[in-house]
Image (cartoon, helix red, strand yellow):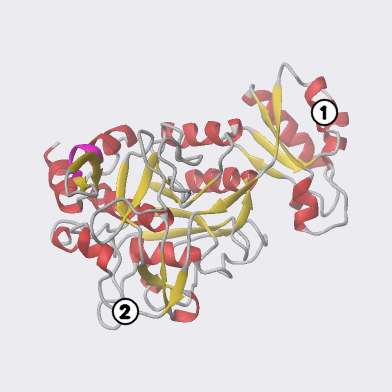
Amino acid sequence: MNFTRIVHTLHPPCHGDRLQQQNTRHILTFHDPGLYAALRQQWLTSARAGAASRVLWAPLAQCIIAPSPLAEQIEKKWRHEAVTEEDSTIHLSGLSSRTGGGPGIPWGVKAIKAPQAWSISTGYGIKVGVIDTGIDVGHPDLQHSLGRGINLVHRGLPPFDDNGHGTHISGTIAAANSTRGMIGVAPRSIIYPVKAFDANGSAYVSDIIAGIDWCVRSGADLINMSFGMQTRSRSLLDIVNRAGQAGIVVVASSGNDGKRRAIDYPARYPQTISVGATDRKRKIASFSNRGQYVDIYAPGDKIMSAWLHGKYHEMSGTSMATSHVSGTIALLLAQRPGLKPAAIKALLQRTAVPLRLQRGISSSEGEIHTLKFIREGLRG
């Protein structure tokens, strides 16, 4: 089959910055893996110099992500073989922050009883894909927890963090500096940083798709996604599905809008483990989305963790809660590799501790209890 016309439309303009290019991006998803593979081969043999770097291929989702001003014509021509979706923005789930704090075990790590579980597991060797703003590769608390990574914002460069959010998330999951620094939930797990968000904390759905694809191909055991959007993406759902089918646990933040009956995507997809935030009193944090779509709650209010330039920072948000859950799952996977995502979600809910309501009455919603989760998981 000749793909000359469609390949021609995928060639992006050779000018404009990243935002200008991204604003014209579309995600083209093929139903037939053979058709997708054939198109990709022709693209690779015909792409002009420089153009290939601006067209992304996500083999897991069978997606092409490219600037395409002729998206409607492409969809019409290939309506039986593929669907197109306009790229959209997605944002991090972090709130107010302040610099300060110091080394030790943060209150959230203590609250979920992670230190009591370290005699059983420290998460040794578990690969945690963190799709975020990158990581401070020189932070002393993260140097022993750093694996390979990728930069989807500035391709070809290491996943340097120019925002701080990704470093904060990584610290809660895997910081490992017991002498002078902080300790995360799973101090011997390995962070695979994926820089998909820019310095302003914004990304595109296409970047997330490419990030998930990279995590799966790189052998990640679970993926932390501390971000969200309020619109549903078919392409994002598809690749989250495929990651789950590959046995990878996907943990996502519920959002910080204080909603009672709705949460952000991708946390709302049933294939993810959706996380809400609690405070020091074991109550749902005022900013946290909540309700039937939230699978588990974890500390997310005034969480101290690693920051840029080897420093520490306090942040609040369901982002912070999500990293506690990812670390806890890493602890269990180190002892029970291959445990299915659905089984992990059920175990989290079964071992959760009921939350406190305003008048001290326990609710049906639960906060993660790491020690109970590990012990029960090892009995299964």
Which residue is found at the position 58% from the left and 42% from the top?
Answer: 209
Which residue in the structure is indicated by mark 2? 181
Please tell me which residue is depicted at 42% across the width and 33% down the height of the picture.
Answer: 271
Is residue 207 visible in the rendered image? The answer is yes
Q: In the rendered view, tell whether residue 8 sits above or below residue 207.
A: above
x and y percent of residue 196 in the render?
59, 55
Does 350 lie within the magenta span?
A: yes
**Direction front: furthest residue:** 359
Single out the residue that lies furthest toward the top. Answer: 80
Residue sitting at the far bottom = 180
Is residue 325 rendered magenta in the image?
Answer: no
Under mark 2, the amino acid is Gly
Could you say which disc has been placed on residue 312 in the image? none
Question: Which stretch is magenta?
Answer: 349-353
Q: Amino acid at mark 1?
A: Glu
Q: Which residue is mark 1?
A: 72
How far apart are the alpha carbons under marks 2 and 1? Answer: 54 Å
Q: Is residue 215 left or right of residue 120?
A: right
Q: Nearer the viewer, residue 317 or 15?
A: 317
Whether residue 66 sits left or right of residue 211 in the image: it is: right
- Residue 364 is situated, as x and y percent measured from the top left of the image, at 22, 37
Q: Is residue 341 left or right of residue 257?
A: left
Q: Residue 16's quadrant in the figure?
A: bottom right
